């Protein structure tokens, strides 16, 4: 179990975050560049000192500003895979993997047995005598993971391990990484700017925004109940804040959102709450839609963005009041000749608008 | 014309570059050639056996090797400190380290005499301990260390500073304490610069003349190194001076070539590391 309370100023930037993750669990830190993700990993590894806070893994305190405890990085049991892997260029792949074991004082015989076992586990035993620069990006990533895991650390820190890979290898490596993380007994903290990676790899997800944890919880919780516009945007969802003005039959309520009124599932309270709309529930029409959708928002198309995970889907952002994002197929975009600037109507059913406090 | 003008200028530039490089090379190569052409190889071999030459050769080798070893052992920690730390007075310290490179050697010799001479600043304390430096072989080594240290410290410092932080950090997370990191990550990665520094300071120690003759004198067998022997022979026997000089040239060349031949950690080249990091 990792419990960390980190506080650190770097120039104008102020990181202040509380993080928790259990054994065999993967905590994904997701956020844009500059949100403090890598800083969190450096603080956990001991490569950077918090101004205040506490870091504890299970019963071992690694850092406690109040108690004056600070373990240097080489006394903490972490496996750290930085973004560019930082494999030692003067050593072979095998020697890279052996480095930590030798530092820890393992005898030569045991080290080489462990190295071979680790390399075999990652399917790179045949690369043991190669130099890091002779390896492909995917092979380098596996070598870096092998090096970090050779000592079986109770805490594994991964800093955008997929960012250095090209798009085609990335997806297969991501699947591979997911299987690996599921099999690991250690706590894993995984940093990424990609919500897709966060959703695929994270048991828990913490969204970092400007050095703060905007929201943190199990993956399903973030998908079902995002609590800020930023989190919803990262998860690719439409989120509104509104207040019930009147109720209609069938468990449906009229909710005021800014100047507009949306029909939504009744939250059962008069307080202000969140409304969540999945972009895939939103259809786009040139004129008035014929269907039974009770919510219509009209506006000009602000932009059309390809949605990477499914190559044939596109996200259409509408400058309506309130603004809304629809996710439609490429065929639909072609059939309606959608382009930025075109006025269209977005339609979605009241039952597609989930509400919560 | 608009097309012709740059063409003419380009040709002129190329000619000027070639001419300047040619003159420079001639200036460097001609004296060497004159030296080497003056001495038939047979005479060279015959003279090596002469006691005065042999003594100077032996003394030069011993003192410059000792000086280079001292420079590395004492200079490496300083280079590391300068490469990785910021502290008050660092600029002044850097100036102090660089100074012998621009100081006239005779001035350095005089300064050494005033510091370590019998009545010098530290000399009194030294002689109280029974240590005498001026006009001794140890004094020769001290003079060589003084003059050659910056030729090692400057490149060593640059080499250590150029090792990327991520490698040091990675080592720290792999249980390596700073000492292990220094010997197993920093030193090997800075190796090309360190070897270059060793070669440069070694060559400087071997060729040291002014500080040595001022501080340690010119005593055959004790402080008369090869360059001093050349100078002395020049007054009496030009042939002998030329022979000694040729030996010194060959020795210096061998030193440079020898250090270049040392394999820098297998096949590792910095350009590859840069590519790999992308």
Image (cartoon, rainbow, N blue to C red):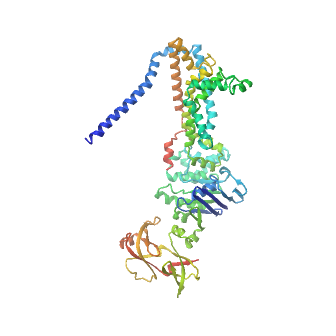
Identified at 68% across, 25% down, the residue is B120
Q: In the image, is residue A224 above or below residue B231?
A: below
Of B13 and A330, nearer the camera is B13
Q: List x then y, in percent, for residue B43.
A: 50, 13
Q: Residue furthest left?
A: B1
Q: List x then y, in percent, for residue A342.
A: 37, 72
Q: Is residue A73 visible?
A: yes
Of A324 and A221, nearer the camera is A324
Q: List x then y, in percent, for residue B183.
A: 62, 40
Q: In the image, is residue B161 above or below residue A226?
A: above
Q: Residue furthest top?
A: B236
Q: Quadrant of residue B79?
A: top right
Q: Quadrant of residue B121?
A: top right
Of B185 and A136, nearer the camera is B185
A252 relative to B2 in the view: left or right: right
Q: Quadrant of residue B160?
A: top right
Q: Which quarter shows the N terminus of chain B?
A: top left
Q: Is residue A186 visible?
A: no
């Amino acid at each position: 179990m990792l419990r960390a309370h980190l506080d650190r100023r770097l120039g104008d930037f102020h990181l202040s975050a509380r993080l928790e993750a259990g054994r065999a669990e993967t905590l994904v830190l997701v956020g844009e560049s500059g949100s403090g993700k890598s800083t969190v990993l450096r603080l956990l590894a001991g490569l950077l000192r918090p101004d205040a806070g506490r870091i504890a893994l299970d019963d071992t305190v690694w850092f406690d500003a109040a108690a004056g405890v600070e373990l240097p990085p080489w006394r903490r049991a972490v496996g750290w895979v930085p973004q560019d892997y930082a494999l030692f260029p003067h050593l072979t792949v095998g020697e890279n993997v052996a480095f930590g074991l030798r530092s820890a004082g393992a005898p030569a015989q045991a080290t080489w047995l462990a190295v071979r076992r680790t390399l075999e586990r990652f399917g790179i035993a045949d690369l043991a005598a190669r130099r890091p620069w002779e390896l492909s990006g995917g092979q380098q990533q596996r070598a870096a993971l092998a090096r970090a895991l050779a000592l079986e650390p109770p805490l594994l820190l991964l800093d955008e391990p997929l960012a250095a890979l090209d798009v085609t290898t990335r997806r297969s490596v991501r699947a591979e990484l997911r299987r690996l993380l599921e099999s690991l007994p250690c706590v894993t903290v995984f940093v990424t700017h990609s919500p897709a990676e966060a959703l695929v790899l994270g048991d828990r997800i913490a969204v970092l925004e400007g050095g703060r944890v905007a929201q943190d919880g199990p993956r399903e919780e973030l998908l079902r109940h995002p609590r800020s516009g930023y989190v919803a945007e990262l998860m690719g969802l439409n989120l509104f804040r509104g207040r019930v003005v009147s109720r209609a039959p069938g468990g449906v309520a009229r909710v005021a959102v800014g100047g507009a009124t949306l029909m939504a599932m009744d939250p059962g309270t008069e307080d202000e709450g969140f409304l969540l709309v999945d972009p895939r529930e939103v259809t786009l029409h040139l004129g008035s839609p014929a269907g039974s959708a009770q919510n219509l928002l009209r506006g000009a198309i602000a932009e059309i963005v390809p949605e990477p995970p499914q190559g044939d889907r596109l996200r259409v952002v509408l400058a309506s009041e309130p603004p809304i994002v629809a996710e439609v197929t490429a065929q639909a975009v072609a059939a309606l000749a959608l382009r930025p600037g075109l006025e269209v109507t977005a339609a979605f059913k009241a039952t597609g608008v989930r509400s919560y406090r | 014309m608009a097309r012709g003008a740059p063409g003419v200028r380009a040709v002129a530039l190329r000619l000027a570059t070639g001419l300047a490089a040619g003159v420079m090379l001639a200036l460097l190569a001609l004296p060497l050639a004159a030296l080497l052409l003056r001495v038939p190889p047979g005479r060279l071999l015959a003279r090596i056996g002469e006691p005065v030459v042999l003594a100077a050769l032996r003394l030069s080798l011993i003192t410059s090797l000792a000086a280079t070893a001292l420079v590395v052992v004492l200079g490496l920690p300083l280079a590391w400190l300068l490469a990785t730390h910021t502290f008050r007075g660092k600029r002044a310290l850097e100036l102090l380290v660089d100074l012998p490179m621009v100081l006239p050697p005779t001035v350095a010799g005089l300064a050494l005499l005033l510091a370590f001479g019998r009545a010098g600043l530290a000399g009194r304390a030294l002689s109280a301990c029974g240590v005498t430096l001026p006009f001794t072989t140890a004094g020769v080594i001290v003079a060589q260390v003084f003059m050659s240290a910056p030729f090692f410290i400057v490149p060593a410092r640059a080499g250590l500073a150029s090792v990327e932080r991520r490698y040091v950090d990675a080592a720290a997370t792999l249980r390596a304490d700073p000492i292990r990191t220094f010997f197993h990550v920093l030193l090997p990665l800075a190796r090309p610069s360190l070897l270059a520094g060793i070669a440069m300071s070694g060559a400087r120690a071997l060729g040291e003349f002014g500080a040595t003759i001022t501080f340690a004198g010119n005593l055959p067998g004790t402080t008369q190194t090869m360059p001093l022997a050349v100078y002395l022979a020049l007054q009496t026997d030009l042939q002998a001076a030329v022979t000694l000089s040729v030996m010194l040239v060959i020795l210096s060349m061998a030193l440079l070539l020898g250090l270049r031949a040392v394999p820098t950690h297998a096949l590792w080249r910095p350009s590859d590391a840069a590519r790999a990091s992308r």
